[in-house]
Image (cartoon, rainbow, N blue to C red):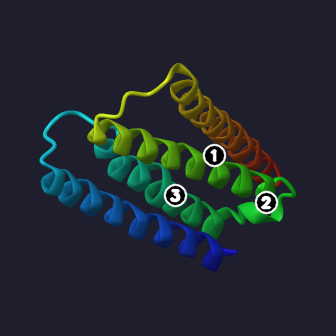
Amino acid sequence: MMKKISNTAFVYTIVALVAGVVYREYTKVVGFSGKTNLSLLHTHLFTLGMLFFLVVLALEATLKLSEQKIFNGFFMTYNVGLILTSLMMAVRGFLQIQGAELSKAVDASVSGVSGVGHILLGVGLILFFMNLRRTIATK
């Protein structure tokens, strides 16, 4: 399980680095200098992806979090939530850079999918803390 968590942190690191480069270079190429959600993606992926899973890795090494039955539920829910949220940040950011006029339906759709991602992140965090509390209670 430690390898899986470590690999997850590493993948988020790579994706965060790529997101930062894409934002920087793409905005230069198209001559965009305004505010965009794409600029936030880099730090969100580092913090909610890499840093969070490095903390989970340290807790796994010391407490064996994965021995609890809900660990896999936390792991999947949190990752799906972070991926959905990140994808929608990227979509909205690219649309902002392009200056696209969004219909109310498209704007609501992007917001809705992002909202689902945020909800899954929240559920994932609750499962994480339930897992952590149960693990500590058994020690």
Between disc 1 and disc 3, whose residue precedes?
3
Instruction: Tell me the quarter of the picture where residue 92 sits.
Output: top left
**Could you tell me which secondary element the residue under label 3 belongs to?**
helix
Is residue 13 shown above or below 98?
A: below
Number of other residues with Cα within 10 Å of mark 3, as a class: few under 14, some 14 to 19, many 20 or more: few
Q: Residue 72 carries which label?
A: 2
Kindly identify the residue that appears in the image at 16 percent across and 43 percent down: 32
Residue 139 visible at all: no
**Could you tell me which secondary element the residue under label 1 belongs to?**
helix
In space, the residues marked 2 and 1 are separated at their CA atoms by 14 Å
- At label 1, the amino acid type is Gly
In space, the residues marked 3 and 2 are separated at their CA atoms by 16 Å
In space, the residues marked 1 and 3 are separated at their CA atoms by 18 Å
Kindly identify the residue that appears in the image at 66 percent across and 35 percent down: 116
- Give the residue number, with chain letter if any, for mark 3: 55
Left or right: 120 in relation to 14: right
- At label 2, the amino acid type is Asn
- At label 3, the amino acid type is Val
Which residue is nearer to you in this view: 26 or 20? 26
Kindly identify the residue that appears in the image at 44 percent across and 57 percent down: 51
